[in-house]
Image (cartoon, rainbow, N blue to C red):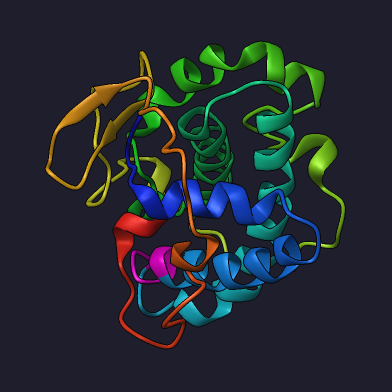
Amino acid sequence: MKLRQNIRHFAAKKALTMPVVGDIATDKLVDLHVRVFGEKADPSHREEREPHMAAFFECTFDTYVRALEEGFSEAEAREITHIQANFDFYNHGWTEMMEFPAEELEEHYERYEAFFERYDIDIANPLGDFHTQEIPAADSTPERLEEPEHPHAVGGFADDVYVEDDDGEIHVGGQEAPEDVDVEVAPGMQNVDGETDESEA
């Protein structure tokens, strides 16, 4: 899939893997992701989905850290968590929130199949072994799966992880991490109550 990647994402990587700071970063990044994906949701369902998303996303940050520990790049680890989220959106029929078309679910799964199998993750069970807390139930709209509409999805990037930098250039596989990264510039660590920037997710 295609993601954005800049210094803020490398700062988040650093923050999430630090003692104490990691918990603070997780809380703020969960809030940011709930806002970003909440804005993609059908407005009539947005509020009732937020508790579900908050708990779900918190679990995916454990996935992210584990993927980093296993040697995946920042972009790959983040893509894994976004794939988990899209599995969950699909299972609930939240097609308007998906980042890639439903027909690409299997291809995204297969690229990380070894990792997913190791932690009992699949399309029907998006969190697998990372389901470490209760996830509040939320509405489902299965009727949207019959003729899914994906207003926010970007297709055609299922064969690898692609990242777009701040200059709009596309890099296959992600960028090299900069040497000096300040955790204070991580997404969500500043201006939490300000305008949501989708590129930070």
Examine the rendering and report whether any part of residue 118 can be seen. Answer: yes
Examine the rendering and report whether any part of residue 138 can be seen. Answer: no
**What percent of the width, then of the height, locates residue 190?**
45, 78
Q: Nearer the viewer, residue 34 or 125?
A: 34
Image quarter hosting the C terminus: bottom left
Q: Residue furthest bottom?
A: 193
- For image coordinates 67% across by 34% down, the residue present is 124
Relative placement, left or right, of 127 versus 158 is: right
Q: Nearer the viewer, residue 50 or 7?
A: 7
Relative placement, left or right, of 23 versus 1 is: right
What segment is highlighted magenta in the picture? 36-41
**What percent of the width, then of the height, locates residue 96?**
33, 55
Relative placement, left or right, of 194 versus 132 is: left
Q: How many marks?
A: 0
Q: Nearer the viewer, residue 17 or 88?
A: 17
Give yes or no for residue 40 being in the magenta stretch: yes
**What percent of the width, then of the height, locates residue 53?**
60, 64
Q: Residue furthest front?
A: 180
173 to 139, vertically: above or below: above
- For image coordinates 39% across by 32% down, the residue present is 102
Image quarter hosting the N terminus: top left
**What percent of the width, then of the height, locates residue 152?**
26, 51
Give yes or no for residue 22 being in the magenta stretch: no
Q: Quadrant of residue 195?
A: bottom left
- For image coordinates 70% across by 22% down, the residue present is 116
- For image coordinates 69% across by 11% down, the residue present is 114
Q: Nearer the viewer, residue 119 or 24?
A: 24
160 to 58, vertically: above or below: above
